[in-house]
Image: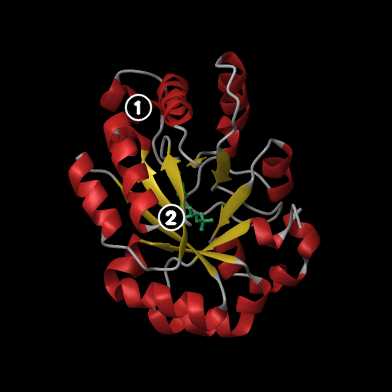
Amino acid sequence: MERGISKVMLALDNMTDQEIREFLNAHGALLKIVKIGMEAFYRYGPSFVAEISKQYGLEIFLDLKLHDIPNTVSKAIHSLKGLPIAFLTIHLSGGEKMIRAAQLAMHESLPKAKLLGVSVLTSLDEEDCQKIWQRNTDEVFHSLYEMALKSEIDGIVCSGFELAQAFEIERANNSQRAPIKVCPGIRFENSTKDDQSRVMTPKEAFDKGANYLVMGRAITTNPKCLTQVELFT
Ligand code: C5P
């Protein structure tokens, strides 16, 4: 299935170990990929990742957003060897050398997993970008995305509002390959935005070219929506 729930990575945020298991006991069969972030990984550790994957037959997106010197990122990835990870994140702003060190470590220790580069965090606004990089969000995204293309990273995490720019940069660079595009900041027509400022619906994001969506609260606070596949297309 090209679209639908199999292309939704469910973010297991704001839940204890027990709450996650209760949620997955009730709804895990409707899911394919779950995202475990720093919150659960730091609290429950690698064995939790392995257990969730095995017990519920789920693919794991481990969203650690690694960002450090190349050697440390490389060693961190080697430490994950043997875990059933399908996707892992690093920050593109760690630079080309860090990206390459991460790719090499993935090749050696997590050969089946895809490496995703986080572009500009959706929590950063124009003022933040100016303060950090003295450039606007579009300019920062542009240079990070060109770096992602050059390094041939498997995919990127970006706002759905940046997809058009991403495709434009691919065209301008005559890129032969398109990185996988994973988009958070997704809400159904009538759901609340919570702390996300710019949101779009699953249909809008897929229409703009997203390959996968990261969705958390819109589903975890209303799991009945999982049975309405049309909401996700
Ligand atoms: O609950 P909600 O759907 O807003 O959750 C979005 C998920 O996507 C969270 O796990 C958050 O950490 C993640 N994320 C994000 N914006 C980014 C990158 C990741 O919201 N730029």
Farthest residue, direction top: 172
Here the colouring is secondary structure
Q: Residues within 10 Å of mark 2 (few under 14, many from 20)?
A: some
Residue for badge 1: 129
Q: CA distance from mark 2 to mark 1?
A: 34 Å
The label on residue 111 is 2
Label 2: which secondary element:
loop
Q: Residue at x 60, y 51 (%)?
A: 213
Work out whether 133 lies above or below 233: above
Question: 84 or 221: which is nearer to us?
Answer: 84
Circles 2 and 1, Cβ within 8 Å, touching? The answer is: no
Farthest residue, direction right: 230
Q: Type of residue at label 1? A: Cys
The label on residue 41 is none
- Residue 21 is situated, as x and y percent measured from the top left of the image, at 48, 83
Which one is in front in this view, the residue at disc 2 or the one at disc 1?
A: 2
Q: Residue at x 68, y 37 (%)?
A: 209
Question: Could you say which quadrant of the image residue 190 lies in?
Answer: bottom right
Farthest residue, direction front: 108
Q: Residues within 10 Å of mark 1 (few under 14, many from 20)?
A: some
Question: Could you say which quadrant of the image residue 28 lies in?
Answer: bottom right
Q: Type of residue at label 2? A: Pro
- Residue 129 is situated, as x and y percent measured from the top left of the image, at 35, 27
- Residue 191 is situated, as x and y percent measured from the top left of the image, at 64, 57
Which of disc 1 and disc 2 is earlier in sequence?
2
Residue 82 relative to residue 156: left or right: left
Label 1: which secondary element:
helix
